[in-house]
Image (spheres, helix red, strand yellow):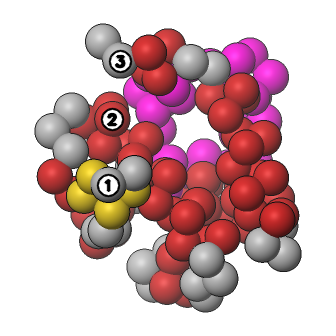
Amino acid sequence: MHRIFTTAFSSVYPHYVAKAERKKRTKAEVDEIVGWLTGFDQTTLEHHLEVDSTFEDFFAAANLNPNASLITGVVCGIRVEDVEDPLMQKIRLLDKLIDELAKGRAMEKILRS
């Protein structure tokens, strides 16, 4: 089991927001991306942040967007579509979406609409 699986999502979430804000994007956009990928509304997302859900629990409760399979590319030198462990793949998919946000990609393209 990889260490990130038992890491609290709430401990990584501020880094997602900081990365976005450094590139003139917003927390609301990060929340929109997380909601799109997981199916969580704002209340559910905030609940997971408050109770310090691990990545494992966070994604176990998620209803992954059917268009998540359209997310491709490289994060940390690894192609997200080639990650074998399902949980690690979900984490990498979220990382990829946040990277796209920070690189200035339009929300419509990030959300694969």
- Does residue 112 appear in the picture of this structure? yes
Give the SS element for disc 1. loop
Contact, CB < 8 Å: mark 3 with mark 2? yes
State the mark number for residue 88.
2
Where residue 23 sits, quadrant-wise, is bottom right
Point 41% across, 27% down: residue = 60
In the rendered view, does 1 fall on the left or right side of 29?
Answer: left
Q: Main secondary structure of the magenta part?
A: helix
Point 56% across, 18% down: residue = 7
In the rendered view, does 106 fall on the left or right side of 52?
Answer: left
- Does residue 28 appear in the picture of this structure? no
Q: Earlier in the sequence, mark 3 or mark 1?
A: 3
Residue 56 rendering spot, x and y as whole percentages: 44, 22
Compare residues 80 and 51 and report the one nearer the observer: 80
Residue 97 rendering spot, x and y as whole percentages: 51, 63
Quadrant where the C terminus is found in the figure: bottom left
Q: CA distance from mark 3 to mark 1?
A: 17 Å
Q: CA distance from mark 1 to mark 2?
A: 14 Å
State the mark number for residue 2.
3
- The region drawn magenta spans 37-63
Q: Callout 3: few (<14), some (14-19), or many (20+) C-alpha neighbours within 10 Å?
A: few
In the rendered view, does 6 fall on the left or right side of 48?
Answer: left
Give the SS element for disc 3. loop
| Mark 1, residue position | 77
Contact, CB < 8 Å: mark 1 with mark 2? no
